Image (tube, rainbow, N blue to C red):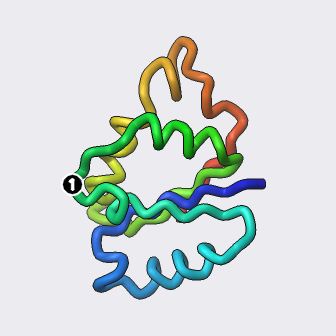
Amino acid sequence: MRTLVIVAHPGLHEGSRINRELTETVRHHHEVTVHDLYQRYPDGHIDIEAEHQLLLQHDRIVFQFPFWWYSSPPLLKHWFDEVLTFGWAYGPGGDKLQGKEWGIA
């Protein structure tokens, strides 16, 4: 089962201990792709088509992020709004992610 770990931590490499350790541990597992949103999109401009293709290539999607003020970091919220679109991820015809496993770390 191919697993995509979407990491959304603005200080992953500068100040994080736990999330950085989790990321480095899973990075070396077979059939796991680690996708660091803050590294990939430092300007916040998300390539929606590339993200769709990445999601389609994996069976399990895990979101790894620090829990801030009962929410997620801003780039992850922006990612949700931009990538999980009506007619693709939900709504009429929005069945592209059907059958995938989802998790939060």
Q: Position of residue 91 (x, y in %)?
A: 51, 17
Which residue is nearer to you in this view: 72 or 4? 4
Mark 1 crowd level (few <14, some 14–19, many ≥20, 10 Å Cα): few
Which residue is nearer to you in this view: 40 or 20? 40
Image quadrant in which you'd find residue 73: bottom left
Quadrant assignment for the N terminus: bottom right
Q: Give the residue number, with chain letter if any, for mark 1.
A: 43
Find the residue positioned furthest to the top.
92
Using the image, determine if residue 51 lies above or below residue 84. Answer: below
Indicate left or right for 19 with 1 as reference: left
Q: Position of residue 28 (x, y in %)?
A: 65, 77
Q: Position of residue 25 (x, y in %)?
A: 60, 81
Circle 1: element type: loop
Image quadrant in which you'd find residue 8: bottom left
* Residue beneath the point at 49% across and 18% down: 87
Using the image, determine if residue 15 lies above or below residue 79. Answer: below
* Residue beneath the point at 49% across and 58% down: 6
Q: Position of residue 34 (x, y in %)?
A: 54, 64
Residue type for callout 1: Asp
Indicate left or right for 28 with 10 as reference: right
Which residue is nearer to you in this view: 21 or 34? 34
Find the residue positioned furthest to the left.
43
